[in-house]
Image: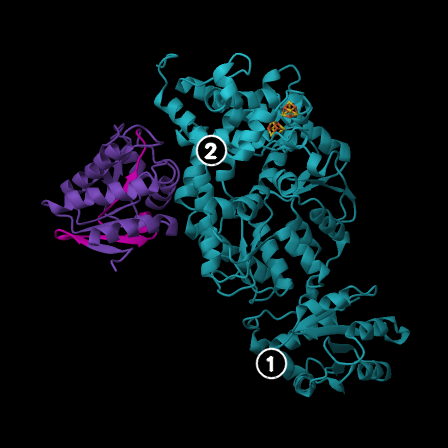
């Protein structure tokens, strides 16, 4: 019987790992924040980034925006444990071509990470939750995009998918199992 | 820009999603309205804006109904002009709809209960909100709060460290107030009777409600805990109409309680939290909940009825009135329990009129407190509530909802009423008769500083000059208690039945009698009543003991003075001594 869930798979020379936790507290080289076009941090993970990381991050962002959907930029991570934060603007609220735009957004985030020499990068379920990207679609597109990207030449050694709860965990674990099979 | 021939992507999304949302109940409400107008004056917006028809419930409902008629009902396709069918084409049309469904209705359901045709506007108003949210059209405040709840796990963006710090701080304050290091708020303790969940507003603005609840649990001898995560029982999905958010939030809470193997989830006083968690949550989350759920109103009332806590209601002597939260009362039918509790802990309760299912909204419902763009409208409509409050002559308005606390505070300030707002938990905690808590929590007794007891004993035995009768049919239990009491200076008489207890009490005139509730022969309730009615034993203090808490009910049902305390079985020496000393120091 093939496994129906998995928490770690190898893709090329890199690994893709699924964990439960608070992405803003991870000790990684970079984590991705699903940003607004105007790069205002706002609420949600934005609250955690500004409260735990300090005001420097928003100050740096004020020089960098606005961004189009599918673009990403990096800033420092202030007092957070991560090396830097990659702010990526993805599709939201059931807009047209959500899957295509999401794929481009994930690729943009990985490209920025590559440029910064990031080896370990964490991403949340991009756009799922508040921005209404359906969770199954999110899991499928993200895992397929990692598969595609990590097969090529890359300095990224580990991609961490950091989910908040069991509801988010399940579709990603199922996707990774398919990947493994 | 959209024309009548071209529909915007968002408008198209809203219409196609509408089809998927049409449950039988909603479709029924869509077709049932006969425009009789009976609901019109139910609405606080209408009463405060008599010349403006756009606030009438049926008018507001028609903004949504026309879409249904046009796209999902054959009458609208054949006779659109006759059944007032219509559509949305542009994002501006959706913005207009937003102004109605978020800005002109608090989903209070007062019109719903006054409709003879059973039209539930609030339900399809919520559905319309959800459709707009799915395409990102919502008031900014709704977006901020929803994102916090999705990503931080609570709707006020309280970070985990701040939540845990607040619990620590409340524990320290309680320890200082009660002079007992054992009073601490337990976090993530497994296998408890109660897992207590709260509204993040309590952490951010009103931590006293947490410490008051902790105090009540402590005096009730409850085995309880608070979760470190998944502790927010509020659910903005109820207000925003986003069932996915509703399900995610409820599931986090349910999974945490299951992980802790809690026997019961107690929901602190919050109308929408109670409705979302207990009534709607299992559906939204598609979760088969394996534990009981209860409002803290019921928990507090139960403690009082079971004699697990004791109160002195004269401590709450200001005139109070009660505001029924729409969600607790109209939507969940909780009308009498808060009143029963209120009468037990206050001396001057006055009803507000109308009340119960007919009460008016605090005007902060449906998430209105987060939508600052509609504040002037909200406060204008609040004149109805202000008049209701003023007519009671009360100085305090009590409500069992954090949302209502904010809504009422705001209108009290705006209309300059001489009143304050409080909750039942505050009144119960304020009325607690402190020495009554003598139970030993399951899962281990609280840590009592042994040195303190010993140091005291070194000077003078703590029970010197005390006479105690120990009544229990189990000789081991009698020996255990008698030895401890004797070791600490008491003179002890042993009784192995109810009749022997009566006899020993009458002949020895003890200071205290410990009464086991499960002795064979004469029922304990009868023995207790006879002891209480004996004119020669008016000063006798009685402490009931049982390993079956339900037996205590029979004692507290007697029409005589209740026992001074109770002890669970088994009990350790330090807890026993501490409890007995407290009872002996207690004045009638
Ligand atoms: S009372 Fe019911 S039937 Fe009459 S107008 Fe209001 S919603 Fe329609
Ligand atoms: S639900 Fe309440 S606020 Fe909304 S229309 Fe009905 S009475 Fe008015």
Left or right: where does residue B490 sit relative to residue B17? right
Query: Could you say which quadrant of the image residue B387 lies in?
Result: top right
Q: Which mark is residue B18?
A: none
Q: Which residue is mark 1?
A: B454
What shade has chain B been given? cyan
Query: Could you say which quadrant of the image residue B565 lies in?
Result: bottom right
Residue pictured at 48% horizontal, 47% vertical: B250
Q: Is residue B416 above or below residue A20?
A: above
Q: In the image, which is nearer the foreground, mark 2 or mark 1?
A: 2
Q: Which residue is mark 2?
A: B21
Q: Can you give x and y, in whole percent of width and height, for residue A148 in the image?
A: 16, 43
Q: Can you give x and y, in whole percent of width and height, for residue B257 in the image?
A: 49, 57
Q: How many marks?
A: 2
What shade has chain A been given? purple
Q: Which residues are magenta?
A: A10-37
Closer to us: B92 or B339: B92
Residue pictured at 48% horizontal, 21% vertical: B67
Q: Is residue B322 visible?
A: yes
Q: Quadrant of ligand 2?
A: top right
Label 2 neighbourhood size at 10 Å, few (<14), some (14-19), many (20+)?
some
Left or right: where does residue B485 sit relative to residue B504? left
């Amino acid at each position: 019987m093939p496994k129906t869930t998995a928490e770690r798979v190898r893709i090329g020379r890199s690994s893709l790992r699924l964990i439960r936790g608070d992405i803003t507290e991870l000790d990684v080289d970079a984590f991705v924040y699903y940003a607004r076009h105007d790069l205002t941090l706002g609420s949600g993970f934005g609250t955690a980034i500004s409260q735990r990381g300090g005001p420097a991050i928003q100050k740096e962002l004020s020089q960098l925006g606005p961004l189009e959907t599918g673009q990403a930029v990096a800033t420092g991570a202030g007092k957070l444990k991560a090396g830097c934060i990659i702010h990526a603007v993805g599709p939201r609220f059931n807009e047209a071509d959500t899957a295509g735009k999401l794929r481009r957004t994930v690729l943009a985030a990985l490209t920025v990470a590559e440029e910064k020499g990031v080896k370990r990068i964490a991403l949340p379920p991009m756009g799922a939750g508040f921005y209404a990207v359906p969770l199954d679609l999110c899991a499928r597109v993200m895992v397929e995009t990692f598969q595609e990207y990590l097969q090529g030449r890359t300095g990224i050694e580990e991609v961490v998918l950091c989910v908040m709860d069991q509801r988010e965990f399940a579709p990603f674990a199922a996707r990774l199992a398919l990947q493994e099979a | 820009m959209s024309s009548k021939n071209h529909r915007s992507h968002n408008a198209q999304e809203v219409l196609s999603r509408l089809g998927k949302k049409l449950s039988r109940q909603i479709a029924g409400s869509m077709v049932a309205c006969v425009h009789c107008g009976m609901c019109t004056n139910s609405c606080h917006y209408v009463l405060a804006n008599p010349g403006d028809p756009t606030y009438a419930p049926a008018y507001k409902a028609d903004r949504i109904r026309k879409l249904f008629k046009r796209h999902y009902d054959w009458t609208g396709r054949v006779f659109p002009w006759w059944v007032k069918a219509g559509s949305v084409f542009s994002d501006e049309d959706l913005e207009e709809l937003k102004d109605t469904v978020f800005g002109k209705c608090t989903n209070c359901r007062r019109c719903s209960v006054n409709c003879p045709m059973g039209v539930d506007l609030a339900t399809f108003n919520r559905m319309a909100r959800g459709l707009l949210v799915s395409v990102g059209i919502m008031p900014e405040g709704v977006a901020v709060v929803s994102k916090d709840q999705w990503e931080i796990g609570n709707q006020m963006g309280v970070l985990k460290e701040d939540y845990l710090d607040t619990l620590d701080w409340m524990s320290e304050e309680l320890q200082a107030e009660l002079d007992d290091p054992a009073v601490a708020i337990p976090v993530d303790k497994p296998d408890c009777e109660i897992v207590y969940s709260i509204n993040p507003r309590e952490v951010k603005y009103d931590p006293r409600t947490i410490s008051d609840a902790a105090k009540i649990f402590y005096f009730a001898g409850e085995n309880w805990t608070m979760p470190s995560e998944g502790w927010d029982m509020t659910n903005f999905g109820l207000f925003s109409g986003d069932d996915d958010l509703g399900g995610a939030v409820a599931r986090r809470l349910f999974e945490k309680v299951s992980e802790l193997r809690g026997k019961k989830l107690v929901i602190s006083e919050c109308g929408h939290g109670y409705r979302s968690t207990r009534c709607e949550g299992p559906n939204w989350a598609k979760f088969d909940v394996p534990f009981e759920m209860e409002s803290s109103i019921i928990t507090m009332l139960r403690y009082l009825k079971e004699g697990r806590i004791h109160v002195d209601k004269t401590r709450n002597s200001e005139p109070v009135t009660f505001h029924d939260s729409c969600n607790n009362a109209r939507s969940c039918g909780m009308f009498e329990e808060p009143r029963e509790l209120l009468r037990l802990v206050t001396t001057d309760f006055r009803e507000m009129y109308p009340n119960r299912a007919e009460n008016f909204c605090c005007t902060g419902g449906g998430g209105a407190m987060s939508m600052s763009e509609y504040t002037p409208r909200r406060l204008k409509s609040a004149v109805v509530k202000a008049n209701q409050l003023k007519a009671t002559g009360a100085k305090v308005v009590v409500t069992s909802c954090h949302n209502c606390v904010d809504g009422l505070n705001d209108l009290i300030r705006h209309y300059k009423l001489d009143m304050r707002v409080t909750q039942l938990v505050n009144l119960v905690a304020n009325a607690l008769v402190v020495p009554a808590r003598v139970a030993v929590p399951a899962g281990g007794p609280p840590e009592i500083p042994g040195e303190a007891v010993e140091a005291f004993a070194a000077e003078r035995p703590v029970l010197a000059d005390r006479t105690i009768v120990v009544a229990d049919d189990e000789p081991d239990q009698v020996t255990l208690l008698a030895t401890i009491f004797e070791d600490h200076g008491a003179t002890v008489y042993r009784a192995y039945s109810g009749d022997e207890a009566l006899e020993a009490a009458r002949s020895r005139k003890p200071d205290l009698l410990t009464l086991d509730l499960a002795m064979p022969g004469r029922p304990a309730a009868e023995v207790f009543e006879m002891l209480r009615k004996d004119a020669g034993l008016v000063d006798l203090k009685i402490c009931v003991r049982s390993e079956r808490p339900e037996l205590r009910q029979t004692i507290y049902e007697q029409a005589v003075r209740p026992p001074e305390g109770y002890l669970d079985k088994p009990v350790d020496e330090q807890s026993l001594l501490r409890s007995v000393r407290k009872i002996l120091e207690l004045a009638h």
